[in-house]
Image (tube, rainbow, N blue to C red):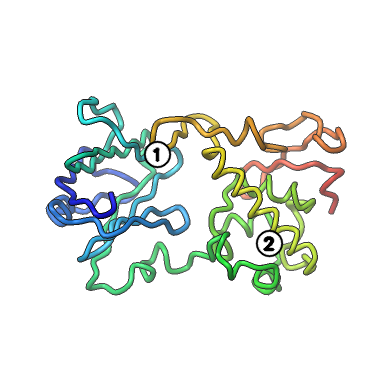
């Protein structure tokens, strides 16, 4: 997309998590894409006069398709360039396609982005940063990671995996972690997310990447997630499943003692 003129933006179904703004097609069609970025789980398509903010929801995908490929059921929006087509596929319609006008200031100040934590591979994401941000927090560390206001990118799957790698019990109070354990957790988060990126993400049910292929993280790296009752790969203790904040958490009771 970057450097290309968007020939046409087409909305087939505006009823997403938040309605796709009326007139958005007219606002961006015919304009040049200056750059494409990511902030947390949000994709940002930057134009001279504003930024399109895209969220894929629980199971959405943005895929590049040949010019002749027919649109599928649940393809709700399309970006058409002279040499490429991109389709937003979202069966549950939990995703979003929004617009931030440049006249409203930096896109980083948008309400959906302003309170997001640091990026996990940012040089400022250090054990000291993590320790200071966790101090005084009584919430369980697993739920604290999911909140996304300290560090982004650590979703439900990768939180369980990172905590296992760091040998931290998911129910541990976030503010009780020592500097040494924050160092272990910071490194575990980066290792887990790097493995996920290199293996194309995680596919539980219907996730696919931009070319329509499923992610291979589970086959290559998963240690605990959705392995309840199976032996821990380190100590053979059965993996346990609990519910935290209505989300499933997986951990080893022996390797991750409180």
In this rendering, the answer to whether 254 lies above or below 23 is above
Q: Nearer the viewer, residue 252 or 246?
A: 252
| Distance in Å between CA atoms under marks 2 and 1 | 30 Å
Q: Residue 119: give x, y in percent of width and height.
A: 53, 62
Q: Residue at x 75, y 59 (%)?
A: 184
In this rendering, the answer to whether 103 lies above or below 202 is below
Q: Which label is found at residue 24? A: none
Q: Which label is found at residue 139? A: 2
Q: Which residue is mark 1?
A: 60
Of the 4 image quadrants, the one containing the C terminus is: bottom right
Q: Residue at x 68, y 62 (%)?
A: 139
Q: Nearer the viewer, residue 180 or 149?
A: 180
Foreground tag (2 vs 1) = 1
Badge 2 element: loop
Quarter of the figure with residue 83: top left
Q: Residue 194: give x, y in percent of width and height.
A: 60, 49
């Amino acid at each position: 997309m970057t450097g290309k003129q968007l020939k046409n933006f087409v909305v087939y179904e505006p009823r997403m998590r938040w309605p796709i703004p009326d007139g958005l097609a007219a606002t961006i069609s015919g304009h040049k894409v200056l750059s494409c970025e990511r902030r947390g789980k949000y994709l940002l398509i930057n134009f001279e006069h504003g930024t399109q903010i895209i969220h894929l929801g629980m199971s959405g995908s943005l895929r590049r398709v040949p010019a002749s490929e027919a649109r599928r059921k649940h393809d709700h929006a399309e970006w058409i360039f002279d040499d490429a087509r991109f389709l937003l596929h979202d069966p549950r319609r939990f995703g979003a396609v929004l617009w931030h006008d440049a006249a409203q200031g930096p896109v980083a100040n948008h309400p959906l982005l302003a309170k997001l934590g640091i990026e996990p591979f940012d040089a400022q994401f250090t054990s000291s940063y993590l320790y200071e941000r966790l101090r005084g927090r009584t919430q369980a560390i697993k739920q604290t990671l999911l909140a996304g206001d300290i560090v982004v990118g650590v979703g439900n799957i990768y939180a369980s995996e990172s905590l296992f790698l760091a040998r931290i019990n998911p129910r541990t109070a976030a503010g009780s972690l020592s500097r040494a354990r924050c160092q272990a957790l910071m490194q575990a988060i980066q290792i887990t997310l790097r493995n996920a990126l290199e293996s194309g993400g995680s596919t539980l049910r219907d996730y696919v990447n931009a070319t329509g292929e499923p992610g291979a993280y589970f086959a290559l790296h998963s240690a605990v997630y959705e392995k309840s009752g199976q032996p821990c790969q380190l100590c053979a203790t059965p993996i346990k499943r609990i519910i935290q904040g209505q989300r499933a958490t997986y951990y080893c009771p022996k390797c991750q003692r409180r």
